[in-house]
Amino acid sequence: MGRTLPSITIAFLQEQQSFARFRRALRRSDQLALDELFAAAHQHLAAAAYAAHPLPFETFLLAMLLEEHKQVLGLRRRLDELLAAQEEHAHPE
Amino acid sequence: MGIVLPLILRYARGMDALLNLFSQDGREKEGLLYRYGLLDRRLLAIAAPHAGSQVMLTLAAYLARRGRVRVLDGGNRFNAYIVARALRSLGADDLTQSLMRIQVARAFTCHQALALLEQTPPEALPTLVLDLLDTYYDESVPLIERLRLAERSAACLRALSQQAVVVVSLRPPRPPAVDPTGLLDIILGAADRVWLQEPATPDEVPRLF
């Protein structure tokens, strides 16, 4: 009966809405980057709900960092592959 | 009708003065809290749009830092996220511990609201009652019954306030200037002190001619 807390989706939308003025003041390219950050956090709403943190925005920030780090790991792996290929090309045995 | 309000502090716009209380430091804040009766054995009432939710939740956070606090929610207005944010802004290190000191009970009908008040043990714990009259505005219950329940609720609130501070928040029915039911007057009449927020009036548009 009733609810004890807003759902994590509503909490997410409220947090996103609270940055509407900040977003509006950004230039267009930065707005798109910010939207990507929030989209990244949105991918982990289920985990954020399970975490049940009293300050959900901290979980959203961590989710953004998580996606960023995944991209860094992917780029690092890609760079290693390219360096290995370059090394092999320079010293073919 | 003939009810003399004990003391009415009117704020034309919002409850900034009350909220600013919590942003002040140290001894000065303690003095102001005593001055406003927030630490005494009193029954305080806040009548405001949205039942002064922001003020009440900030007050819950402040009291939770000091010790246990009871929250009786009559309008489903308790939002733990807002309380957590308020605790963080008040500099609470033990966020979870502070939140665990808040005991929340909710009511969804006016009969449940009265039962909640009657079953609340008279302990020396501060009690916050959020949007008490929300369930009393339910027109499916006869007005005479609601008035009777409101009278008994007011008596319960008075009894609880003999042990520790009780702050009750109320939302005037629409239109806010008129309460045809008289429910608001019953609770305000029982209070030792009332904060009454006047509805914000829109800025007057300057005329060209």
Image (cartoon, rainbow, N blue to C red):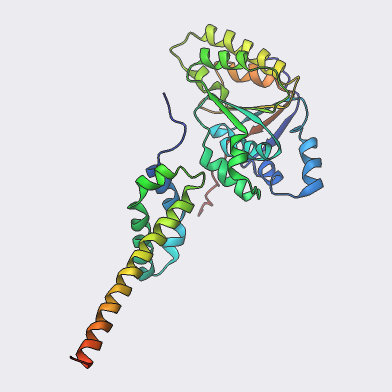
Image spot of residue B181 (x, y percent)? 55, 15
Image spot of residue B56 (x, y percent)? 61, 35
Task: Please tell me which residue is depicted at 54% across the width and 11% down the height of the picture.
Answer: B146
Task: Give the quadrant of the N terminus of chain B.
Answer: top right
Image spot of residue A47 (x, y percent)? 38, 47
Q: Camera-side residue: B187 or B153?
A: B153
Q: Camera-side residue: A93 or A42?
A: A93
- Vertical comparison of B113 with B15: above or below: above
Q: Camera-side residue: B65 or B149?
A: B65
Picture quarter containing residue B172? top right
Task: Please tell me which residue is depicted at 67% across the width and 22% down the height of the picture.
Answer: B188
Image spot of residue B120 (x, y percent)? 63, 17
State left or right for residue B125 relative to residue A39.
Answer: right
State left or right for residue B72 relative to residue B10.
Answer: left
Task: Please tell me which residue is depicted at 47% across the width and 10% down the height of the picture.
Answer: B141
State left or right for residue B194 relative to residue B30.
Answer: left
Q: Decide if residue B59 is in sight here.
A: yes
- Vertical comparison of B52 with A47: above or below: above
